[in-house]
Amino acid sequence: MTRISFPDDFLWGTATSSYQIEGAWQEDGKGESIWDRFTHTPGKIKDGSTGDVACDHYHRYREDVALMKEVGLRGYRFSVCWPRILPAGKGEVNQKGLDFYSRLTDSLLEAGIEPLLTLYHWDLPQALEDQGGWTNRDIARWFGDYAAVVARALGDRIKLWTTLNEPQIFGMLGYATGQHAPGAMDQLQYILLSHYINLAHADGVAAIRNEASAAKVGCVLQLPPIHPRSDSDEDRRAARVMDGLMNRWYAEPALLGRYPEDILELFKDLDLPILDGDLERMNQPLDFAGLNLYSRLFAYHDPNIPLIEGMLDFDYRRPGAEYTHFGWELYPKSIYESLMRFKNEWGDTDVYVTENGIAAEDQLVDGKVNDQDRIDFLAAYLAEVRRAMDDGVKVKGFFQWSFMDNFEWAEGYTSRWGIVYVDYESLERTLKASAHWYRNLIESGGYDR
Ligand code: IFM
């Protein structure tokens, strides 16, 4: 047995997002979001469900914060639903929306839990989508204005701020493959609008700093290692290109204030909408980076796609590898590999792991959920986090995904990610075995393995 220990001031938390847990989709003046529209469109969600009620966290947040306290959490990452604050996406502020997040923040602070706020976890106001959404250059300004409203209201109490959750995921799935809201399918358009995503992040950072001078501001990037599917030179190059498209295209602007040269070269005939002054505007130094990490991906060379000369292979199943119930490979080393990049490539910044976890087939039996697979997952990944810290990465905290079972986007309620079990009929919450394990880990600062 080895003891895996963490520093006393390590920020142990869990994470959620607004659309996935809040419900109350039409309450207290909230506007429609693209996810409201998308889930109400038949055929988009695997089990035909919506987030109309979800975990009803909007009404039960006090009970949820009490449970977080019971688990001994020191931190909690949540996101703000943009159309709750600005029903039309811009202009008139809905005070009742702000009041909800203000009450949530106060409850967390009273319970001794440090909030980490994410401004955008994919629930764009539908009113903005009707004006082009992320394809409209003005989105950066709209996002900055929204960030200012939230920072003005909560900046006196919230210290840790982040802008956009997983930019490349909502961009690709929402605008290129159509699996997520708003369901567009245009690869070229996605590449062009990715610049607006990076601009929006930067405008959000500037707005937060302007309104809340004590705020620590970061990004939240999902950065899976991308490995070549074979050892051939072509596949290796494909992996490097896919890493550029998927990871470095967002990490480098946020953390180094510039675009990666090789990808700019790849895009040189595309007429990217980068205007004079944009690169300066995008250069907004951060206080920390947030890493969301679950597994790795594979890439291969595809001679039929001259533009990118490589493809991500989402279906590739490596012989002998283990997969989660959700189909993602169990590969703990992935978190070590990604964390090391912050030290070696991206400015040696402070890092919080803002998401990591597993979907499992949890069953409630006699009032208990024995999710040993989740405990094993966390123990294996956290050992790799520790290893990265030993190798010099400045990891400051870890937010397990997710605090409770919730609405998993296009998969609906078919997969459970929480350390708290939610009965979707009664909405009753039950701590799983992993929640007890996490509590012990937090209390004792480590675990045996
Ligand atoms: O549920 C999502 C979350 O919203 C973003 N990161 C990945 C999680 C699991 O798929």
Image: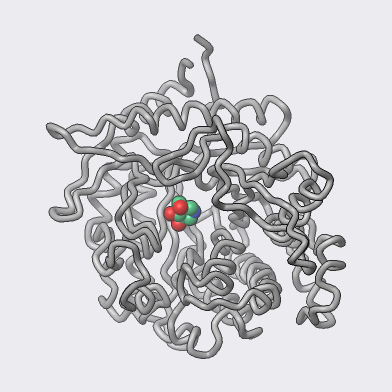
- Residue most toward the top? 1
* Lateral position of residue 207 relative to residue 275, left or right: left
Relative height, residue 377 to residue 189 (above, below)? above
**Residue 10 horizontal/vertical position (percent):** 54, 33
* Lateral position of residue 247 relative to residue 36, left or right: right
**Residue 39 horizontal/vertical position (percent):** 34, 72
Name the colour scheme. one colour
Q: Nearer the viewer, residue 172 or 298?
A: 298
Q: Is residue 9 visible?
A: no
**Residue 199 horizontal/vertical position (percent):** 69, 73
- Residue for point 61% across, 82% down: 135
* Lateral position of residue 159 relative to residue 406, left or right: right
**Residue 415 horizontal/vertical position (percent):** 34, 49
Q: Nearer the viewer, residue 19 or 183?
A: 183
- Residue for point 48% across, 75% down: 183
Which corner quadrant of the image does residue 307 belong to?
bottom right
Relative height, residue 195 to residue 167 (above, below)? below
> How many tags in the picture?
0
